[in-house]
Amino acid sequence: MHSYSTLWRESVTKVLLSCQQERSYKVQSADEKGVRKLAVFIDTMAQYSRISGSVGLITLSNPPVNALSAAVRQGIVDTVEKALGDPQVKSVVICGQDGIFCGGADIKEFGKNMSGPPLIPMIHTIECATKPMVAAIEGSALGGGLELALGCHYRIAHSKARLGLPEVTLGLLPAAGGSQRLPRLIGVPAALDLITTGRHVTAAEALQLGIVDQVTDHATVDAAVKFALSVAGKPLDTRRISTYPCPHVSDVDALCENVMQKVRKSAHGAIAPIACVQAVRAAATLPYTQGMEREKELMATLYTSGQARALQYSFFAQRAVSKWRIPSGARWDTSTPRPLHKVAVIGLGTMGRGITVALAQAGLPVITVETHEKQLMEAKRAVSDMLNRGAKRRGVAPPLDKISYSCNLQDLADVDLVIEAVFEDMTLKKKVFRQLSAVCKPGTLLCTNTSGLDVDQLASQSRNPELVVGMHFFAPAHVMKLLEVVYGPQSSPQAVATAMQLGKKMGKVSVAVGNCRGFVGNRMLKLYTEQASFLLEEGATPDLVDQAIEEFGFPMGVFKVSDLSGLDVGWRIRKEEKLAGLSVASGQSTRIREGRRYSPLADLLCEQGRFGQKTGRGWYQYDKPGGRVARSDPWLHHFLEEYRAQHGLVARHIDHQEVLERCLYAMINEGFRILEDGIAAGPEDIDVIYVFGYGWPRHRGGPMFYSGMVGLEKVLERLEHYYQAHPDVPHLQPCRLLRRLVARGSPPVHKWREVIKNLHSQL
């Protein structure tokens, strides 16, 4: 017996072949691939056929996600008109090609003059149709795709489908009726949750909420066609969502105000979530037509905002960094990653545990080595707990069987890749790399999780330095999305490709960067934290600096982050670098190192045993060791006054603007130096690193994008001003690339690579 899917394939082929005299179609059967696919390339990008005698089938065809481009919208308008005008058609099913319903608007059209039929009238026509319209949702129905489905009278979803309105993540709101229909369908509280967060829901949750009418484990189009046959001829008045009143809420104003307060706190200055609340409130308090007008007004404000541009830039930047290239000429599309059947992690401290969990959750067999028996047992319990908690959240079985534990490095003889995550000490890491080089089979990739040590020095300890790369994870490693993949001059393209592919498999946003002290993220961070300390010396307080940074959009200020991480971590590194402690040359000024200004404030706090949250005292005070709530500390303010007096410093007024300019512009200037040095391939790499690894507010794009929004001329002018005021801080001197960009008329960020390329060719 033929399934509807088979009949669909056969009938569409016949219809299109019979129409070749009328229009120019290219028809190619895809039966040889054994999947329900008909590659029909037509100018409307929506295919129409009639199956089961009376069901019109409209298939969106715009790979890879069937985005609602102008051509697709025109295709939907044409095919809906054809279906509604066909007397033999009694009901209509809309589906997507290749197992995806519709991924939403075509983001490539953003910022351009819109062409083709508008989305709102198209969806309105579908909703007003006199024949039942059924959405067959496979894969995903996101953004405009879900709005299209909400315009249909019924929605049938595959059990593995995901649905959502993620426009807020692009600085927008659902503006094709989504903010007005969804609250009418599922209620205001649930709609506020989905629309203000942009989160995706599973088909099961969508069914529970009432977004879909039916969920199937079988062929979705077959189920939708069967359903369409069953509802043919039935009244549709109760199926048009725009006619629904919103389900009653006892005090909608109080509800919306409560959500608004939460959104303001979590949005860190982003305006789109606030507009989303306002749009949903309109749905709850206004007739549909007036609510649509309010939706349109709010969207108009968002669409042209700098935040929307920043968020859309970030969206594309995240995809751009996966198309990596390194100075040797190797690139993502010419380098083949090595298959990984078994991987290993050495060192089961905080980072090693998180990396192990992330690998196991990605489905990879992992062997972990910790030479200290007590720490091995503690880590085994901790890793199991982390996996169990994660599995419970996702509703799956914990992959405990993927991990084996050992105290012996000899057990790594047959692994394909090792991630070293031992204590951040060069001598120790070199020893481990020598041992791995002796134990592992030829061809094993050796990766280090160092946050800034010289990867080339570690590679020199290996018999195969071309197989050594850095994999800098961010804590907690099973949660944080960023991975810096660090290549050296000897790293092979295959090694880089394998590390990048592994990061992708682990769900990371991986960025390929060159080897230097601190790589990209920590190299820039050093200048940011340095300026923050200088500001304290000059009259600021930790509270003032952190408030300015948090108002800008960072989730935590620089000094709160320092207390959370532990002041002793940086202190140990500075002592190793002979910047602090007994190794500092006698007679050397406490505020000068290597001929440059240096702030010993953090060192002095560490000498007092103030390591941050772990000791209950740091830049702030806490109720107890391990406390989380930071409170201003009068002791610290007195300490700063004494310090200034001791060094002849006169406190002056420092405002939020200076805090931002000093901290952020110094960081941005170093970002330009990183581009100059070829450590990062382009500004997108830096921006993705800072958005996903360092808490840079996504609605500001990233430090390099932000510099363009502020104006490169202004950044240059302010850096020159501060360098003149502080000539003992060489990092404030504007770098050559920044000057070159300004001289070229401050081109937009997507054109910087041309200037960088020209600069490199002159070196």
Image: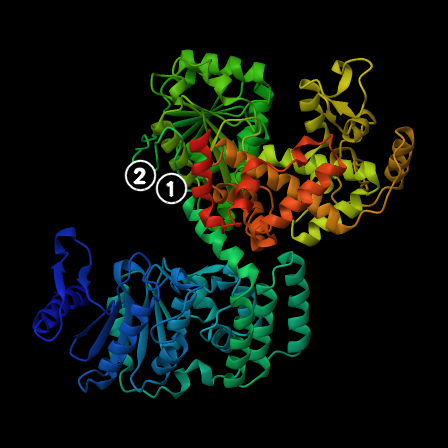
Say which element carries label 1: loop
* Percent x, y of residue 280: 56, 74
Could you say which quadrant of the image residue 100 lies in?
A: bottom left
Dot 2, crowdedness within 10 Å: few (<14), some or many (≥20)?
few
Q: Secondary structure at mark 2?
A: loop
Query: Reading the chain from its start, which is encountered first: label 1 or label 2?
Result: 1
Q: Quadrant of residue 42?
A: bottom left
Residue 557: in sight, yes or no? no
Residue pointed to by mark 2 = 333
Judge left or right: residue 310 versus residue 754. Answer: right
Q: Where residue 193 appears, x then y in whole percent?
A: 56, 65
Residue at image position (35%, 20%) is 414
Q: Nearer the viewer, residue 256 or 160?
A: 256
Placement of 514 over or under 412, stated as above or below: below
- Amino acid type, mark 1: Lys
Q: Quadrant of the N terminus?
A: bottom left
Residue type for callout 2? Asp
Q: Going by the image, does 438 lie left or right of 169? A: left
For residue 134, side relative to residue 167 (left or right): left
**Residue lying at 40% horizontally and 21% vertically, measured from the top left:** 490
In percent of width and height, residue 415 lies at 37, 23
Please give the label number shown on residue 323.
1
